[in-house]
Image: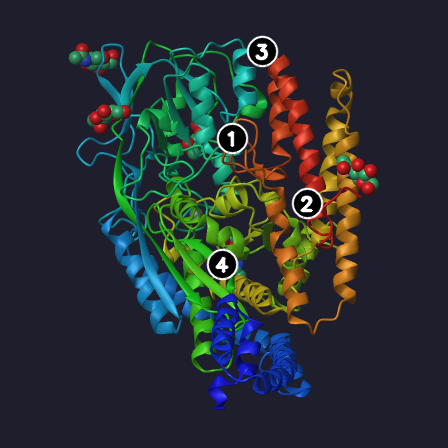
Amino acid sequence: MSLEESPSGAAYESLGADDSVLTFRKSEQKRGTMGRGNRSHLILIWIVGLCIGVGVGVLIGWFSSQAKFPDEEAYNLWRQALTEEDAQKISKLLIDELKADNIKENLRYLTSRPHLAGTPADKENAEWVKDRWIEQGLDSANVIPYKVLLSYPNVDKPNYVYILNGNGSVYFQSAREEAPLKQGDLKEGTVPPFNAYSANGTVTGELVYVNYGRIEDFQKLTGELNIDLTGKIAIARYGKIFRGDKAEEAAAFGAVGLILFSDPADYAVESDLGVYPDTWYLPETGVQRGSLYSYQSVGGDPLSPGYPSYETAYKTSEDAAGLPTIPVQPIGYGDAKMILEQLAGPKAPDEWQGNIHNLTYNLGPGYVGGRTVKLEVNTHNEERFTYNTIGIIRGSIEPDRYIIAGNHRDAWVYGAVDPSSGTAALMEMSRAMGKLVKDGKWRPRRSIVFASWAAEEYSLIGSTEWVEEFTKNLGSRTVAYLNIDISVEGNYTFRLKSTPNLYEAVFSATKNVPDVPFPGHSSTVYDTWLDRTGKGGDRPSVRNIGSGSDYASFLGEIGVPSVDLRYTFNSDLGLSSYPLYHSMYETFFLVSEIMDHSFEYHLAVTRVWAELARSLADSLILPIGVVDTAEKITGSIATLKDFYEDQMAEQGITWDTIESASSNLTTAAKAFESNVADMEKNDPFAVRRVNDQLMQFERAFIDPLGLPGRNLQRHVVFAPSSKDAYKGDAFPGIVDLMFDINNPEGDVSDDWEALKQHMSVVAFTLQSAASTLKDVDILHRD
Ligand SMILES: *[C@@H]1O[C@H](CO)[C@@H](O)[C@H](O)[C@H]1NC(C)=O
Ligand SMILES: *[C@@H]1O[C@H](CO)[C@@H](O)[C@H](O)[C@H]1NC(C)=O
Ligand SMILES: *[C@@H]1O[C@H](CO)[C@@H](O)[C@H](O)[C@H]1NC(C)=O
Ligand SMILES: *[C@@H]1O[C@H](CO)[C@@H](O)[C@H](O)[C@H]1NC(C)=O
Ligand SMILES: *[C@@H]1O[C@H](CO)[C@@H](O)[C@H](O)[C@H]1NC(C)=O
Ligand SMILES: [Zn+2]
């Protein structure tokens, strides 16, 4: 009997698959032609064979459970390799590798010409970033185009604000562009001051001063001050809230046009010190550009809400895109003085008086002596290409986990502060990380993704379109999004906006980075930050993260833990932003000669960014704090409850369920953190399991149906305030509904009903977030 015919082989096979049983039967039949004695012999062999077969099967099973490990030592080495932490050495190498001079040279290059979204310089810079990243040693880098709706003034027909005499002749005309104050201030490609997405059109009429153009200003004006805005042109000062919200409210209160100006009270405080180019304060010729698109509901291409702007994608009509309905134009305070000077009507309230020299601010309407204002805006919308650049350093052990560091690249003009101070930092961070990888000194455990966003200034467009395009990958794989828009807007203190689960990670990073030393004082970034904002407590101050930069879609659409980092000025100055914000005077000169001579503040912020990315990429257990989130939620609920409890009680609404869910969340978060602290860290699968819980925790606050009336703002706890897109509110759904109830435009019974439903959704969301922190068998109520 040859070995091939041995039934033992067939018996063994028959343990596996049905057709091998068939094979065996066939061969048995064939053998059936043999004699009797042979048959009993065969049965014996068959039984022995069966036993051997089963034994081999068991052995194979045993070996495969010990996959490829001939002995326990090799198995332990494997586990060790996957669960090792080597943080401190790399942290120091990385921090030391970053250089202020490189950041300075990056900024010099980036500010050498205007680089507005949708212009040739936009594309060239996107390619420049890609080429640098490849050169620096990233594993790959790509330029990703999107065709989106942008907005530009008309080169041949400039926008103007005029004062007309009674007979219609021009008495005054606003400046077409900002006057060059230093050599090199005005270069080809400088876009004149305008507000993106303004309606086009020419309106003539009486002027009314509306302070900052907030809802409360309009309410006071039309109520207590008894001035009707219908058919009038409004003039508002910049500051306090997002400019798009001013335009929206002006139109809602009946204005047919809006003029925006920067008041010295908000942009040239300490006026005795002088203005640019002697100081960083706004001169009278400076004008703030900026978009009017109200992205509290949704950012991104106005024509493709919720979906990526592929060329073939369905685009809504401009009429349906929620763009401003009235013409809007910004001017400087030199021109504003002319325009406000002869305004008729009563003197504006004291707190409405700005700080233009020798000017008493009256309310209007109209001028003494019958002059009128004419506002001519020829700004138009246009679909153009704009470009993201995305680069990656692949992780060594968990390449499918992303730490994303992003900054937008487009600027209104030179953008030396916004955003090129951030781009200069991004390019130095990528260089340093690429170098450690190229030199074989480091490869992060998880992937680090670098993003250079397009057209942020218009409506957070590049980041939003990309998040929408790769929503499935990003939603399931992103650990954190780390944004820097502006890296240095002042030299007083570090400033953080963050989801609470990243507070501790940022605190640790800032404790590892030395701050700019000043005479007799050297400290870490954390020390100065705590000292200057901590109010004597044990934590520096942190702001809620709302909107206003590229983290918005990461947090609001897909629930990725996010931070926004920068160095800022002293808020006691009472500035609305750094003074030269979005003006042509944001130049290399401003940054290198006035704001940060040695680029040390830029260096400090870049180091914090890099160290934070490294710690999230390399730490064995992700530095994500679930208890911090639970405690922040508890605090926010207490504040809101205090505020609204009595009014809600009249409607029979209580906070009991939300408070119970919030307290359950705190309990679950504390139990989770103590389990993680006690767990064996040398089991790679156990580590991955808790890291997935940590990574996904923020997603638990996403409601797929969105906030009331805002279906693409899906984060139930943090979202931009719907009255001011810059501001982050906790529990924005509750705040907005209570606002509508307290500022009724008719019957509010629907609002109360919506509030009851929403509060139930909030309670459910908190309870469901708690359940994600429990062990795998929590598929029942406990
Ligand atoms: C219009 O009125 C202005 C100011 O009152 C005057 O200076 C100008 O000469 C007038 N122009 C015409 C064409 O009447
Ligand atoms: C304000 O008015 C005073 C007195 O008329 C004048 O001396 C001063 O130059 C004016 N200041 C400015 C900034 O126009
Ligand atoms: C003004 O806007 C409308 C659409 O809002 C457009 O049809 C028209 O062409 C624009 N006019 C100019 C001069 O850009
Ligand atoms: C800090 O900023 C202020 C205002 O721009 C500037 O006057 C000062 O020189 C800066 N200090 C340093 C050390 O750069
Ligand atoms: C909180 O947990 C308790 C105890 O498990 C449970 O009875 C209660 O229903 C939970 N609260 C909510 C809002 O689900
Ligand atoms: Zn910016």
Q: Which residue is mark 3?
A: 224
From the viewer's perspective, tell me whether residue 355 is left or right of residue 156: right
Check disc 2 and give the amino acid type: Ala
* The one of 200 and 322 positioned closer to us in this rendering: 322
Earlier-in-chain disc, 3 versus 2? 3
Q: CA distance from mark 4 to mark 3?
A: 50 Å
Please say if the residues under marks 2 and 1 sit with CB atoms less than 8 Å apart.
no
Q: Earlier in the sequence, mark 1 or mark 4?
A: 4
Query: At x 31% / y 13%, what residue is drawn?
Result: 371
N-term mark: 4 or 3: 3
Q: Which comes sooner in the sequence, label 4 or label 2?
A: 4
Is 607 or 442 nearer to us in this picture? 442
Q: Which residue is mark 2?
A: 769
- Closest to the camera, between mark 2 and mark 1, is 2
* x then y, percent, for residue 185: 30, 50
Name the mark on residue 404.
4
Q: Amino acid at mark 1?
A: Arg
Residue in the foreground of this view, choosing between 135 and 390 = 390
Q: Are marks 3 and 2 in contact (CB under 8 Å)?
A: no
For residue 661, side relative to residue 335 (left or right) = right
Residue at image point 67% right, 87% down: 73
Residue 593: image x %, image y %? 42, 59
> On screen, 318 above or below 598?
above
Residue bearing mark 1? 710
Q: Is residue 513 visible?
A: yes
The CA distance from mark 1 to mark 3 is 32 Å
Rounded to the nearest angstrom, the CA distance separating label 3 from label 2 is 46 Å
Q: How many marks?
A: 4
Mark closer to the chain start, 1 or 3: 3
Tag 4: residue type? Ile
Q: Quadrant of residue 506?
A: bottom right
Which quadrant would residue 342 be assigned to in this image? top left
